[in-house]
Image (cartoon, rainbow, N blue to C red):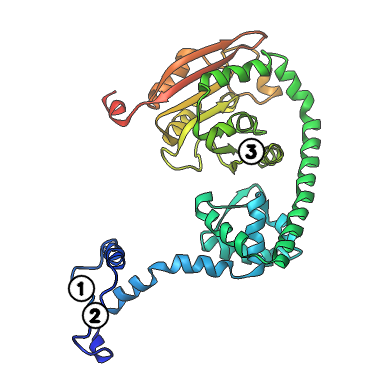
């Protein structure tokens, strides 16, 4: 449908010429929308415009407007400020806010639809986290600058209530550790001390900035606790919601920023080439298909990135299959090298740590550039 705008604005009328920077911004905006063609808007003159295209241009800023509208509610603003402090579940938010879970869920949906937060399911729980810092920090700068004394006092009360949440999480983690400590101690007694293993991992990673770090099978978050401070972003993946809750408690107590996500090693919830460093620490012996897990890690790894696998060398402790659910009894270097190569990775370091009935091995590789993988 074509609407003749001259029925509203006289033909030949032109608005005052805007500043050059406005013309440039407008030209860039129009050029970015392929549907528009040269001549729809030209030289500041108003011509006949297809209403559908005009509305598309006018509403191009709706996501930004939605974001401000989503924040224009006291409860939703409190939610955002709480998530600035820590990840929280729907139930925990309801507890702090003193509102029902259905009501809180409605607010969360509005914030999620506006692109302010993300929802992440872990077992029967749903955790909420803010989107990337660069997208929300400008918003917090405005809140910090504009909040009056009463609003700041309310935020302070909410923050104090989150300390009770932290305490409850810590108590639950301590109970879990106490119940499993004996089993874990038995496994650790079979190989070299963890401190030596961790020193070897540190050496393998090269004492350098790690960029975007992903820990597959993060468990209690130990790898992120050690190496998260050297990363620009630390992500922990684990299939167990119980382990993720333990990791969350530990990393929050240590003050280490991280993103913990429930996921499978065969289908990581991450984009292609979105990681610079990936660690798989004492996980592959639980894998039905270690080759598939390594291939999936390679998918996520950027060219030139590092994959470090830490696990047991091949052994014959058959009882570990039943007592600890180990599917694989360690790995031969040649087999691991083959899996790395098939996934487009070149192994550049293998290190064996002997000192017990089980030998711990570190296999480190880097991802070949695409052109080299095609040639291979």
Give the camera-side residue of 257 and 292: 257
- State which tag comes first along the sequence, 3 or 2: 2
226 left or right of 56? Answer: right
| SS class, disc 2 | loop
- Mark 1–mark 2 distance (CA, rounded to whole Å): 9 Å
Q: Position of residue 177 (x, y in %)?
A: 77, 32
Sequence-first disc among 1 and 3: 1
Q: Around disc 2, counting alpha carbons within 10 Å, would you say few (fewer than 14), some (14 to 19), or many (20 or more)? A: some
Residue 206 visible in the shown view? yes
Mark 1 element type: loop
**Residue 256 circle label:** 3
Q: Which residue is located at x 69 percent, y 23 percent?
A: 322
In the rendered image, which residue does mark 2 sit on? 46
349 or 124, nearer to the observer: 349
Task: Give the crowd class for mark 3: few <14, some 14-19, many >=20 residues within 10 Å.
Answer: some
| x and y, in percent, of residue 307 in the image | 48, 26
1 or 3: mark nearer the eye: 1
**Residue lying farthest to the front in this orientation:** 19
């Amino acid at each position: 449908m074509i609407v003749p705008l001259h029925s509203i604005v006289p033909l030949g009328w032109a608005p005052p010429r805007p500043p050059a920077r406005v013309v440039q911004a407008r030209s860039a905006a129009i050029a970015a929308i392929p549907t528009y063609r040269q001549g729809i808007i030209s030289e500041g003159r108003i011509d006949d415009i297809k209403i559908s295209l005009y509305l598309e241009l006018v509403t191009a800023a709706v996501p930004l407007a939605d974001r401000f509208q989503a924040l224009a509610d006291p409860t939703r603003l409190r939610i955002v400020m709480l998530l600035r402090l820590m990840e929280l579940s729907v139930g925990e938010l309801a507890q702090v806010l003193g509102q029902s879970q259905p009501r809180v869920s409605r607010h969360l949906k509005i914030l999620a639809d506006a692109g302010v937060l993300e929802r992440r399911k872990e077992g029967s729980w749903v955790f909420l986290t803010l989107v990337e810092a660069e997208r929300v920090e400008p918003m917090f700068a405005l809140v910090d600058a504009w909040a009056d004394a009463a609003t700041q006092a309310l935020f302070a009360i909410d923050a104090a209530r989150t300390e009770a949440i932290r305490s409850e999480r810590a108590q639950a983690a301590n109970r879990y550790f106490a119940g499993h400590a004996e089993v874990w101690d038995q496994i650790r007694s079979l190989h070299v001390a963890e401190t030596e293993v961790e020193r070897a991992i540190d050496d393998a990673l090269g004492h350098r900035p790690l960029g975007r770090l992903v820990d597959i099978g993060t468990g209690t978050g130990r790898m992120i606790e050690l190496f998260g401070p050297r990363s620009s972003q630390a992500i922990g993946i684990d299939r167990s919601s119980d382990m993720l809750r333990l990791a969350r408690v530990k990393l929050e107590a240590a003050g280490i920023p991280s993103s913990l996500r429930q996921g499978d090693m065969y289908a990581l919830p991450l984009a292609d080439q979105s990681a610079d460093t990936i660690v798989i620490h004492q996980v592959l012996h639980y894998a039905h298909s270690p080759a598939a897990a390594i291939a999936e890690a390679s998918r996520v790894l950027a060219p030139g990135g590092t994959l470090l696998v830490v696990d047991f060398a091949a052994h014959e402790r058959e009882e570990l299959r039943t007592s600890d659910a180990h599917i694989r009894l360690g790995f031969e270097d040649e087999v691991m090298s083959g899996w790395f190569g098939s996934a487009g990775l070149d192994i550049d370091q293998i290190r064996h740590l002997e000192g017990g009935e089980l030998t711990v091995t570190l296999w480190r590789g880097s991802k070949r550039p695409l052109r080299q993988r095609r040639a291979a």
